[in-house]
Amino acid sequence: MSGFSVGGFGLVALTSALAIAALMVGTAYLGRRAGKVSIVDVTWGLTFVAVAWVGLALGPGDLGRRALVAALVTVWGGRLAWHIGRRAHGAPEDPRYVALLADAPGGDVHRYAVRKVFVPQGLIAWFVSLPIQVSACLGAGLGWVGWLGVGVWAVGFGFEAVGDAQLRRFKADPANRGRVMDRGLWAWTRHPNYFGDATMSWGLWVIAAEHLPGVFTVLSPVLMTWLLVRVSGAKLLEQTMGSRPGYAAYIARTSGFFPRPPRRP
């Protein structure tokens, strides 16, 4: 038996929502002062860390499971926040947000950003983090299915962390200016970082799905994957990259999301 605590889940879910709301309010304030909405991308990973620590502190479930999930999410969200913050430091506003906020009524960009960026991202973060919340309320310790989920998470983390590191080194070389990154993991998928992000969300779901209540959170990784592939991730990025010389050939030989060997010319 999972020993799932409904009352405990209610407390974790409510406190998680309040923690995410507090982070988004603070981020909106900092974004207004800095004149950059893209600061929300740094907060994105931290919202999951906050939820995981809420679960660790307040969840009535097995302590080992709560601690493991909190560790996994902290490593993921902390690294992601650090990576995005480092990349964005001193850079202008992200073109994605420039385009999104161009239609702000009356030129009130900040209020429009709250409605179009900060509130939706907060709601999405809460929904996507449901497997983390449920895991904190499962009384049973981790079994083989849960450890399988840890393995899936590790694969995803490897793709995201290694892919980001490879791209950072590539961009740091002036000789690569204007060229398309098609080496390492980027030869197997055009978006190893997004694939890794999605895979980690599925790994966390498998950990929660070891017991029945967690199975019902499957829409969380589904939403995460859909957003990364069809909305704010790969699709949006390729709209800005499509005109770069050599990118069409890169698309022709390289998988868009799921890794596979590159096609022969």
Image: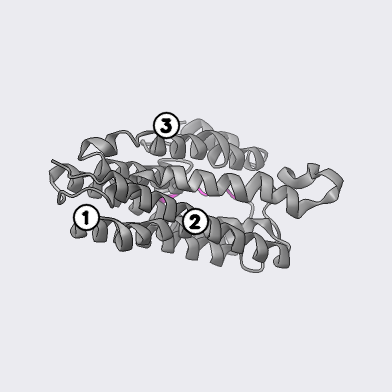
Q: Residue at (42%, 31%) from the top-left corner? A: 264
Report how many numbered discs are placed on residues in the image: 3
Kind of residue at disc 3: Arg
Taking depth in this image into account, of 116 and 62 the one nearest to the observer is 62
Q: Is residue 170 visible?
A: no
The nearer-to-camera label among 2 and 1 is 2
Q: CA distance from mark 2 to mark 1?
A: 23 Å
Name which quarter of the figure residue 218 lies in: top left
Query: Pointer 3: what residue?
Result: 263
Q: Is residue 220 visible?
A: yes
Query: Pointer 2: what residue?
Result: 18
Q: Residue at (60%, 48%) from the top-left corner? A: 119
Kind of residue at disc 1: Arg
Label annotation for residue 65: 1
Q: CA distance from mark 1 to mark 3?
A: 42 Å
Point out the stretch of residues depicted in magenta. Answer: 179-184
